[in-house]
Amino acid sequence: MVGLYRYVMFSQVLKFNKQPGLTQVKRYFCIVPPVQFSRPGSFLRAENNTAITQATTNPCTMASQAKKSCSRCLSSKASSQDGKARVKRVSIEGNIAIGKSTFARLLQSACSDWEVMAEPVSKWQNIESETSKAVDEPPQKTVSNLLQMMYQEPQRWSYTFQTYSCMSRLRTQLQPPPAHLLHSEGTPVQVYERSVYSDRYIFALNMFELGCINSTEWAVYQDWHTFLVEQFGHQVELEGIIYLTAQPAKCMERLEQRRRSEEQGVKLEYLEKLHVQHEKWLVEKSTLTHFEKLKQIPVLQLDASAEFQSDPEVQKQFITKVKSFFDAL
């Protein structure tokens, strides 16, 4: 019976023959030719001698069970889609070293309905490639730190870095929500450290204005960025943005404290320019954006100048504000 049912997906009983035990069945999506059965109640064989298991089950019952099984599958699929639709997508935006990762860990530990997706920095720091100088030699694996290369030679590597960083952010935003968010009875939220939008309207734009990305590269970047965002549509759209603010001098202080090797050459002037870009986009709304929904997106602004990592009272205030923000989305 198993071999036959691989080909017959749905069966509908039309009528019973006058002869006892024989049933005429209408088949849908049947690839194999109709099969003639011998007397029921014993071991059955088709005309092509393919073994069929004992058929003692009423065909009406089997059709009913198949219908119920299909209904359960559709119901499960619909439930999964409804769960995904309920999950809100929010990004954390802010200057370099403002405390996004610390804030993200705070959110992750505060509520099981909030799932944080970390910024893929490690991908930028470890890009594996294979090279081979001769045909008979095995390829040699090398690891490149694109983040460091960009900081050291911005005019050479800025476009390459922004291309790769945006693609890695896109992959992160396209990841499906974890199962526990889909079944959450609260307000499930998937939170991202930065987004494909800040990649373009903060960092890539800033590099273009600094002359590290030329006009041709900028035109190419904008073209494929717009295409990809429009192609994936609601899968990468955000329902809200949390903007962490602090003066560039405070960010510089924290940057020096964390001592990330790639950032040793970062100057205060660079952080000041990034601060201006964030203000234009998220506060003044003067940045020219190319996605209609992005212009209407709600923004929660939090003052991150306080040392919230070690201040429980500030942490409590942040969580309260974030929860209210998420509930209103």
Image (cartoon, rainbow, N blue to C red):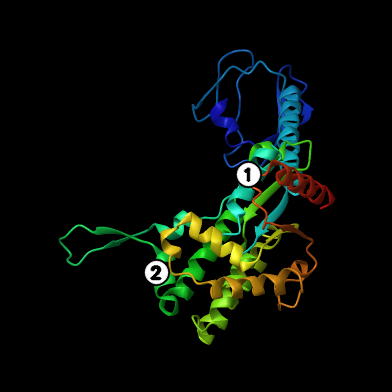
Do the numbered discs 1 and 2 sit on residues whose CB atoms are within 8 Å?
no
In the image, residue 70 sits, relative to residue 232, either above or below, namely above
* Amino acid type, residue under disc 2 in the picture: Met
Question: Is residue 177 visible to us here?
Answer: no
The residue singled out by tag 1 in the image is 310
* Location of residue 18 in the rendering, given as x and y in whole percent from the top left corner: 78, 21
In the image, residue 210 sits, relative to residue 58, either above or below, namely below
Between disc 1 and disc 2, whose residue precedes? Answer: 2
Q: Residue at x 72, y 58 (%)?
A: 303
Quick one: 298 or 46, which is closer to the camera?
298
Circle 1 Cα neighbour tier, 10 Å, few/some/many (<14 / 14–19 / ≥20): few
Label 1 – label 2 distance at C-alpha: 34 Å
In the image, residue 289 sits, relative to residue 231, either above or below, namely below
Can you tell which quarter of the image residue 299 is in? bottom right
Q: Residue at x 76, y 70 (%)?
A: 283
Can you tell which quarter of the image residue 188 is in? top right
Q: In what quadrant of the picture does the N terminus appear?
A: top right
* Amino acid type, residue under disc 1 in the picture: Ser
Q: Secondary structure at mark 2?
A: helix
Q: Hey, which residue is sitting farthest right in the picture?
A: 328
Quick one: 47 or 57, which is closer to the camera?
57
Residue 149 numbered tag:
2
